[in-house]
Image: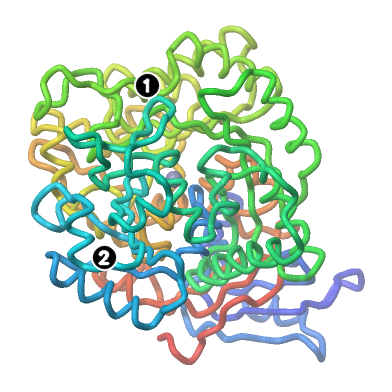
C-alpha cells in the first residue's frame, strides 16, 4: 500500500544487492529515488508500490548497488586537463617514450607544449636530463611529469621558452636543478619550479590552486572561464564513468568555486565538489580570512569549502619527504618540513579556532609527526571539537605516533593505489629510499585503523593514479605485505566503506551523502556484478553499470556489464 503522502519515485532499482553503509539498515533489495533525494529502501514489492506511470524501473539482476563513490583526494582541474595529454605510464626505455612523443607531436602540430603524464623516475634507467628529451624531440618544447606530480623533466626548447635555462629563484622545497656549469639539467622539482612549463601549455589558471593557492592575477575573460570549465567538466565526466559522485578537491582557490557555481547555474555541475583554501608557507596567518570567506560563501549540498590544504613535505622518490632519520641512500639528508614546527602549530591553531578543517599532505614520518604535533597544539589551545582534521597519505609513520591519530580524532586519508607494487607504481626507487628496516612502518592501513583508532578515507589522488575506484578496491584487497611487514588490507566491506561513508564523514559531508538512507542525496553506483561473490581478481573488470548523482543519471552501461 502506498501511503497517500508519499511522493512518486522518479527512478527505482529492484532486485539489487544494496550495501547501504547505513548501520540502521545495512542491506536492501530495492531503492526508490525522488528528485535529488532517496525516497525509500526495502524489498522489491514494497518499493515497486512507489512507482507511478513515469517512473523508470531498472532491474539490477543481483548486481551490487552502493552509495556513489566518495573520492576523498583528487585534483579535478589537473585531471581534467591531463585527459588531453600524452600518457606514457606503461612505457619503459627511451625508444618507447620517444616514439610515443613523436606520434603525439605529429597529431598535435599546433600545441605550444607537448606534455606527457605518468613518467616514472627510473623509466630511462638513469637520472633523466633535458638531453634525454632533446634526443626524442629537440625542435618543439616537450616535457614529462612524474606520476607523483612532484617532478617535471623538460627538454632544452621548453626550458628556453620558459626562461628556466639558468635557473630561477625558488621558495624553499622547489628547485630548478642546475648542473656544475649553472645550466638547468631539465629536472624541475615541485610546483613552483615547473609552473612556467605548465603555463606554456595554457594551463596556468587551472593549476593555480595547487601551484600558489592564489587567485588569477587578472579576472579571466569569459573565453578563459569557458576553457577552464571545459576541463572541469571533462574531469567530472571521467570520474562519473567510474562511479564517483563526490569529490574532495585537494587544491583550489575561490576561482575554482566560482567556476563550479557557474557550471551549476548552467546545469553542468555533475558531481558534488569540496574545494579547500590552499595555505602556502609564505602566507601570513591573515590569509586565512580568505579561507573563512570561502567557507561562508560556499556551503551547499553541491559546492562547499571549509577546509585548508597544506603540504608538509614532498615525496619519497625525490627524497623531499621529511624523515625522522637520514635516507639510507643519502647519509645526512632527512629533508625538512615545509613549515617549521612552531610556525605550523600556530597555523593549525588558527585554522582550528576559525572552525575550519585541517588537511595536510604528510608522507615522511617526520612530516607526519610535525602535523600531528600541530593538531595536538590546536586542540590544547582551542579544546576538543568535532573537527575531523586529516592527514593525507601517511606513507611512513613512527610506531609511537600511530595511537595519536585516534586519540586526536585524526582521519587517515589513504590511497590504495599508492604503495609501490599495489597498482601501477613500481617498487623502485621507493622501497630502496624507505629502506628495508622501515618497510614494516610503510603504507599502513589496517594498523592505522585498528591500533591507531583512525577513521579511514580512501581515494585515488587522481590524476596521480587512475581514478578507477574498482581498481583501487582491487589494489586495496589484494595487496601483499612488504617483507617483514604485516597484512595491511582492510576487509572488502571496510574498503567499500572507506570509499563511501568513510570519505563523506571525513569531509563533513555525511549529512548529505555517503550512505543510502531515505532523505540523503540520491547518489548511487551500480556495479557490473556482485562484488561480494566475484573473485577479487575480477573486481577491476566488473565495470560500472550506472552512476546517479542527485537523481541524475550520469553514466549508464546496463547492457555492457554482467
Ligand atoms: Zn594530491
Relative to residue 451, is residue 229 drawn left or right? right
Query: Residue 436 lies in what quarter of the image?
Result: top left
Alpha-carbon neighbours of circle 1 within 10 Å: few (<14), some, or many (≥20)? Answer: many
Residue 26 lies in what quarter of the image?
bottom right
**Camera-nearest residue between 154 and 301:** 154
Q: Which percent across, then down, holds residue 109?
A: 42, 79
Residue drawn at the location 24% of the way across and 70% of the way down: 537
What coloring was used for the rendering? rainbow
Left/right placement of residue 310 relative to residue 517 reads left
Residues 557 and 54: in front is: 557
Ligand 1 falls in quadrant: top left
Q: On screen, 288 above or below 38? A: above
- The quarter of the rendered structure image containing the N terminus is bottom right
Does residue 286 sit above or below 274 in this rendering? above
Q: Which sits in the foreground, 57 or 348?
A: 348
Measure the C-alpha gap from mark 2 to mark 1.
Answer: 37 Å
Q: Nearer the viewer, residue 37 or 391?
A: 391
Write down the quadrant of residue 366 in the picture.
top left
Element on which disc 1 rests: loop
> Nearer the viewer's eye, disc 2 or disc 1?
2
Which disc, if any, is residue 138? 2
Checking the image for residue 446, the label placed there is: none
Q: Which residue is mark 1?
A: 337
Q: Earlier in the sequence, mark 2 or mark 1?
A: 2
Residues packed near mark 2 inside 10 Å, few (<14), some (14 to 19) or many (20 plus): some
Q: In which quadrant will I find the C terminus?
A: bottom left
**Is the CB of the residue bearing disc 1 within 8 angstroms of ligand 1?**
no
> Residue drawn 53% across and 76% down?
16
Amino acid at each position: 500500500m502506498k501511503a497517500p503522502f508519499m511522493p512518486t519515485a522518479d527512478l527505482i532499482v529492484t532486485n539489487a544487492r544494496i550495501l547501504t553503509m547505513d548501520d540502521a539498515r545495512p542491506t536492501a533489495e530495492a531503492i526508490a529515488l525522488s528528485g535529488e533525494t532517496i525516497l525509500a529502501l526495502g524489498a522489491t514489492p514494497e518499493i515497486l508500490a512507489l512507482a507511478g506511470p513515469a517512473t523508470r524501473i531498472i532491474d539490477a539482476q543481483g548486481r551490487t548497488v552502493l552509495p556513489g563513490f566518495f573520492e576523498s583526494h583528487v585534483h579535478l582541474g589537473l585531471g581534467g586537463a591531463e585527459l588531453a595529454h600524452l600518457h606514457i605510464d606503461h612505457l619503459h626505455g627511451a625508444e618507447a617514450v620517444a616514439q610515443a612523443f613523436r606520434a603525439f607531436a605529429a597529431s598535435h602540430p599546433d600545441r605550444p607544449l607537448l606534455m606527457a603524464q605518468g613518467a616514472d623516475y627510473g623509466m630511462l634507467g638513469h637520472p633523466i636530463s633535458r638531453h634525454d628529451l632533446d634526443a626524442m624531440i629537440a625542435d618543439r618544447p616537450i616535457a614529462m611529469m612524474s606520476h607523483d606530480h612532484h617532478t617535471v623533466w623538460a627538454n632544452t626548447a621548453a626550458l628556453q621558452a620558459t626562461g628556466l635555462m639558468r635557473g630561477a629563484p625558488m621558495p624553499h622545497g622547489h628547485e630548478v636543478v642546475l648542473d656544475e656549469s649553472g645550466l638547468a639539467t631539465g629536472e624541475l622539482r615541485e610546483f613552483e619550479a615547473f609552473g612556467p612549463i605548465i603555463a606554456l601549455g595554457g594551463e596556468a589558471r587551472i593549476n593555480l590552486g595547487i601551484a600558489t593557492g592564489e587567485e588569477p592575477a587578472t579576472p579571466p575573460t569569459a573565453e578563459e572561464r569557458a576553457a577552464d570549465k571545459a576541463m572541469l567538466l571533462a574531469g567530472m565526466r571521467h570520474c562519473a564513468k567510474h562511479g564517483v559522485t563526490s569529490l574532495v578537491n585537494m587544491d583550489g582557490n575561490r576561482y575554482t568555486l566560482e567556476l563550479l557555481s557557474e557550471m551549476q547555474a548552467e546545469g553542468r555541475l555533475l558531481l558534488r565538489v569540496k574545494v579547500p583554501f590552499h595555505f602556502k608557507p609564505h602566507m601570513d596567518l591573515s590569509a586565512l580570512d580568505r579561507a573563512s570567506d570561502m567557507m561562508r560563501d560556499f556551503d551547499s549540498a553541491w559546492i562547499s569549502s571549509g577546509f585548508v590544504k597544506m603540504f608538509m613535505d614532498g615525496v619519497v622518490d625525490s627524497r623531499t619527504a621529511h624523515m625522522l632519520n637520514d635516507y639510507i641512500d643519502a647519509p645526512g639528508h632527512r629533508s625538512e618540513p615545509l613549515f617549521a614546527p612552531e610556525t605550523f602549530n600556530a597555523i593549525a591553531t588558527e585554522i582550528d579556532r576559525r572552525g575550519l578543517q585541517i588537511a595536510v599532505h604528510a608522507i615522511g614520518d617526520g612530516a607526519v609527526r610535525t602535523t600531528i604535533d600541530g593538531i595536538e597544539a590546536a586542540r590544547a589551545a582551542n579544546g576538543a571539537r568535532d573537527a575531523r582534521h586529516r592527514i593525507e597519505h601517511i606513507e611512513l609513520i613512527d610506531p609511537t605516533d600511530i595511537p595519536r591519530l585516534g586519540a586526536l580524532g585524526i582521519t587517515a586519508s589513504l590511497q590504495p593505489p599508492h604503495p609501490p607494487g599495489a597498482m601501477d607504481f613500481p617498487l623502485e626507487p621507493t622501497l630502496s629510499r624507505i629502506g628495508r628496516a622501515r618497510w614494516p612502518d610503510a603504507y599502513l592501513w589496517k594498523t592505522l585503523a585498528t591500533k591507531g583508532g583512525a577513521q579511514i578515507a580512501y581515494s585515488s589522488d587522481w590524476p596521480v593514479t587512475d581514478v578507477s575506484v574498482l581498481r583501487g578496491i582491487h589494489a586495496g584487497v589484494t595487496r601483499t605485505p612488504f617483507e617483514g611487514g604485516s597484512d595491511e588490507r582492510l576487509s572488502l566491506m571496510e574498503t567499500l566503506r572507506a570509499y563511501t561513508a568513510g570519505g563523506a564523514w571525513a569531509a563533513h559531508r555525511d549529512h548529505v551523502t555517503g550512505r543510502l538512507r531515505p532523505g540523503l542525496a540520491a547518489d548511487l553506483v551500480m556495479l557490473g556484478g556482485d562484488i561480494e561473490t566475484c573473485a577479487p581478481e575480477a573486481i577491476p573488470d566488473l565495470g560500472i553499470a550506472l552512476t546517479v548523482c542527485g537523481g541524475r543519471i550520469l553514466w549508464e552501461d546496463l547492457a555492457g556489464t554482467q
